[in-house]
Image: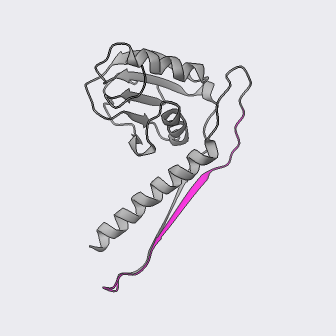
Amino acid sequence: MALAAVLLAMALGLVWGARALFRTLDGTVDSSKPQTTTSTTATSSTTVAAGAEGDSAVSTTTTIPAPHLPNTVIVRVGNGAGRKGIATVGTDLVAQAGYATIGPKNAPATKQSVVYFVEGYQADAIEVARLLSIPATQIAAMPDDPGVPAAEAHLVVILGSDTTLG
């Protein structure tokens, strides 16, 4: 019971931190202007009070490094939506925002879109997810097999049947 409360609190803390980061990063990218970034980080803290059964209080803090310059972040978009051209539309949107892209690929069919990131690129995944209208809850660390060849990509986006693109 106590473990479930701690895990729930940690999950809420991560969602709250991502929400705060979205608010911080909210804005549009004009690829015709040079982009700058700062070395700030987003931090989320969560504290769970001691329970009635005498469990001790637990506190967690999550820090997400600042995003990189978009033109230094390599993104691959995969089509798991089953609708022709969706990955190309996503790739074009990401490229228009100034990100480096690898050609789009077909991916296994999936209901939910997801943005995978390699270590150190979580803030960039949050920004790309926002750009493609993918909820922050659908961002995850890069698995061994993200569904498309990841090559040198820092981010892999798999657009599922829930995508609003195209």
Residue at image position (38%, 13%) is 85
Specify whether 124 is left or right of 149. right
Residue 25 placement (x, y as % from top left): 62, 42
Relative vertical location of residue 6 with respect to residue 126 in this rendering, above or below: below
Tell me if residue 125 can be seen.
Answer: yes
Question: Does the magenta run of residues contain 38?
Answer: yes
Q: Residue at x 33, y 29 (%)?
A: 160
Residue 61 spot, x, y in % from top left = 52, 62
Q: Where does the image place residue 156, in percent across and percent down from the top left?
A: 42, 29
- Tell me where the magenta segment starts and ends, as one range: 36-54
Quadrant for the N terminus, please: bottom left
Q: Quadrant of the C terminus?
A: top left
State the scheme by which the image is colored: one colour
SS assignment for the magenta stretch, majority: loop
* Residue 114 belongs to magenta span: no
Residue 151 position by quadrant: top left
**How many discs mark residues in the rendered view?**
0
Q: Nearer the viewer, residue 160 or 42?
A: 160
From this view, report whether residue 15 is shown above or below residue 146: below
Left or right: where does residue 35 sit relative to residue 18?
A: right
Seen at 43% across and 24% down, the residue is 165
Question: Is residue 44 shown above or below 113?
Answer: below
Q: Residue sitting at 43 percent across and 59 percent down?
A: 12
How far across and down, in percent of the image, does residue 162 sit?
A: 34, 32
Can residue 151 be seen at all in this image of the molecule?
no
